[in-house]
Amino acid sequence: MARGNLLQAALLAYFWLGWVEGTNPGFIGRITSKGLDYARQEGVAALQKELARIKLPEFSGTFKVKHFGHVHYKFSSLVIKSFELPSSTIVPVPNVGLQLSVTNAFASLSGKWRVKKKRVLSDHGSFDVKIEGLSISVVLKLGNDSTGRVTIATSACSTHISNVRVHIHGKRSWLYNLFDSRIASALRKIMEDEICKEVSGSVSSELQPFLQTMPVTAKLDKVSGIDYSLVGPPVETSDFLDLDLKVEGSCEEEGEFFSLTHRSAAPFPPPALPFPVDHDRMLYLGISSYLFNTAGYVYYQGGALTYEITDDMLPKESKLHLNTSSFGSLVPQIEKSYPDMLMKLKVSPSSPPSLAIAPEGLSLAPTMEVQAFAILPNSSLAPLFVLDVSTTISATVAMKSDRIIGSLKIGKLTLSLKHSDVGPFSVQLLQAVINYFASTTLVPQINERLAEGFPLPLPAHLQLSNPVLQLYQNFLLFGADVHYG
């Protein structure tokens, strides 16, 4: 329905934000004055179209004409021919919500008239109306409900028309034009009432249900999801409109990944995010290291960070194979105990991975356990040895459409022998081999999953452009311009 577009575009900012002063969220955001101005343009364009479709009621009354007495009139078939809103503003109102103001608007109408005095006079014709100096002020109250979704309601609406000029056409129109001030007054009241009815009706019957369709969680895979729900009402300042994206209750922190099977608190608090003031883009989104690290915690708890490496996963052109013959050249007792057998490596983290974000870059320092097995002829596994492995990893992130994607680049591995079922041996001999397997099979598997990314909490039909990425201590700051359509 056309009416449903009235304030959706004007309130795009509403969905983009996620920070309240005094909290430490995992996902934050802010719309700038440039973004608000774009929202104003889109919203007013939609409002102008809808006001031009207003159905105006007919009206009637009586007036006194010299030599005729009291004459009954009726004005019907009122049609708005044009409606122009040349000047407007939209601003946050502290502790309330948003205020949309339109000034110096004008419109033109047409319709039919009929006058009648029993047994004396009956006449009809058409009329035109010019409305000038029209102003509209709408205040929208923003809140949240028990499901963590945004609520919106019209808390105030006023319309004022400075000038209404009526011109009546038809027989004796010169006579009826003498009473156009009474007609103008009636039309002024009708227009002022109908405009606010239209705005309030759009908010309650179209915009509020639209907000209720916004998801508060996003399922990523079989293991995890992201919670974007609100636990507090939006907070307005004189320059920005902010939303606090949290999960409901005390089991999870705000803006975090959660397990689909068991939702529990992460064992670490979110860091403080001193959100910078920036104005080059319409929208800025801050993503805390907490959001990434809750993801690592959830996947670690769910066992989703365990990877297996087999010979058929190596590049076809590889001269090195994952079998006892290749390893036997480095650790002879492996080939002696299990000659000519394929092998399997099982890689699992020793603890949840932790991403460090700093102005100079993104990095991880994971510790892992690598278990090596020989694959016996009956397909059962014979344990060979267990290694403790540590390394440093550099990470990159980017914005792709409406998702955050990433990739990893592994550094040099440090190995130590944790346990051996084939006797003691020097792990230094395996350094190059394990590093090769990790860089050719393990990292590509992880990067394939990171390339799928996770969704940003944006409404449908919102497109991002001119993205920019900045690194700060403990969080990433994405900036972008937006387009609705």
Image: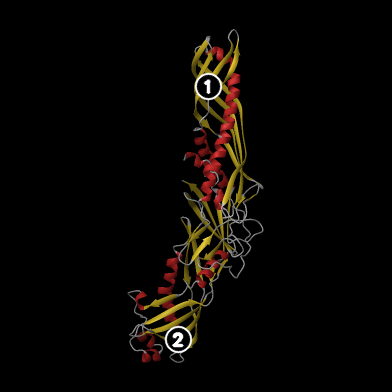
| Number of on-image labels | 2
Towards the viewer: 464 or 185: 185
Taking the image as drawn, is residue 280 in sight?
A: no
As helix, strand or loop, the secondary structure at mark 1 comes to strand
Q: Amino acid at mark 1?
A: Phe
Instruction: For label 2, count other residues whose C-alpha is less than 10 Å away and answer few (under 14), some (14-19) or many (20+).
Output: many
Is 450 on the left-hand or right-hand side of 357?
Answer: left
439 shown above or below 421 = above
The answer to whether the residue labelled 2 contacts the one labelled 1, judged by CB atoms less than 8 Å apart, is no
Q: Residue furthest front?
A: 118
Q: Residue at x 57, y 25 (%)?
A: 187
Mark closer to the chain start, 2 or 1: 1
Q: How is the image coloured?
A: secondary structure
What is the x, y in percent for residue 326?
A: 36, 84
What is the x, y in percent for residue 177?
A: 56, 15
What residue does disc 1 label?
75
As helix, strand or loop, the secondary structure at mark 2 comes to strand
Towards the viewer: 357 or 173: 173
Taking the image as drawn, is residue 129 in sight?
A: yes
321 shown above or below 240 = below
Q: Which mark is residue 256?
A: none
110 shown above or below 459 = above
What residue does disc 2 label?
385
Viewer-nearest of discs 2 and 1: 1
Towards the viewer: 195 or 41: 195
Is 234 on the left-hand or right-hand side of 258?
Answer: right
What is the x, y in percent for residue 457?
A: 52, 55
